[in-house]
Image (cartoon, helix red, strand yellow):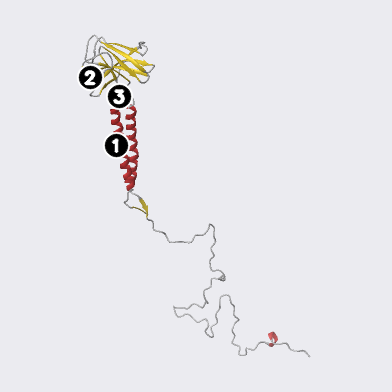
Amino acid sequence: MVEATGKRRTWQLVLGVGLVFVCAVVAAVLWFAADDLHNDNVAGFARAPLDCDTTLNFEGTGRFVLYIETMGELDGVAGDCEASSPYAGAAPSGLQLELRDGQGDQLELLDFGGLSYDTGDFAGESNQTVLIDEPGDHVLSVTAADGTDFVVAVGRDPDDGVTLLRVAAILLMIAGLLAGGLFLVLGSRRRQVAAATPAPWQPTAPPNANWPSGPPGFPVPPPTTGATGIAGQPTMGGGPAADPLAEGTPQRLRGLVLPPVTNDPDPSPDPGSWGPPSANQ
């Protein structure tokens, strides 16, 4: 017999709720950290204003993107020009960009579009890309036929590292829901406890065991012939049965033949038939 005790595994419920809560919190932190990383990437771009030869220091090598930034603010400009800040305008027309390395060699700029950003403090769109082979100081010259309220921002993809953090946040949230949900399901199930009544003990015999029909040493009863008593003469009329041992009433016992009874007063036997032998002189 099995009975439900109604008890639940409390520790599994607590662990399930804890896993879901912790994973949700960590996933949210990673997600907001991805947003902060995006904003920090944009804020760290180098910026060159219009009609200036701006010195840019590249600490690393690789491919960099030049953005036309129409909203933002300059912290300071290294070069031979004065720039106004903050700025908010439209994309210029007739833009001319020229980038030279530390030896004065002009680097090749390639058209490049498809990237944009808007953090609330800065907004821009990709325009060209350049490959930097050697780190160090480079000089960027910016001219345009029309437009003044913009700068050229130089940096990498603003989403560098952002996608990785967001994917990690999503995977962590899914793992927390699965693991926590599993513990919640296991903890919410009622435990089944066996409450069977023990059966009385009975001896068991090995297979093909021949048990004795009686205790050891007890004699075997003799076979019977089927007779249950002394047969007598039946009575007529439903009277009492005759006594088979009454005097003068010969009876036949089953299986026993009696000699005939005579009325000879001299019961002595015939000497010539079975008497003692006589001696012949």
Answer with mark 2 or mark 1, whichever residue precedes in sequence. 1
Whole-angstrom CA distance, mark 3 to mark 1, is 24 Å
The answer to which image quadrant residue 130 occupies is top left
Residue annotated with mark 3: 41
Say the numbered circle drawn on residue 71: 2
As displayed, is residue 197 above or below residue 241? above
Q: Looking at the picture, how far across and down is residue 57, in whole percent?
A: 33, 18
Among all residues in the image, which is located at the extreme front? Answer: 80
Q: Quadrant of the C terminus?
A: bottom right
The quadrant in which the N terminus is found is bottom left
Numbered circle sitting on residue 51: none
Give the SS element for disc 1: helix
| Precedes in sequence: disc 2 or disc 3 | 3
Q: Residue 271 appears at what percent x and percent y?
A: 69, 88
Asked if residue 152 lies left or right of residue 252, the reply is left
Give the labeled residue for mark 1: 25
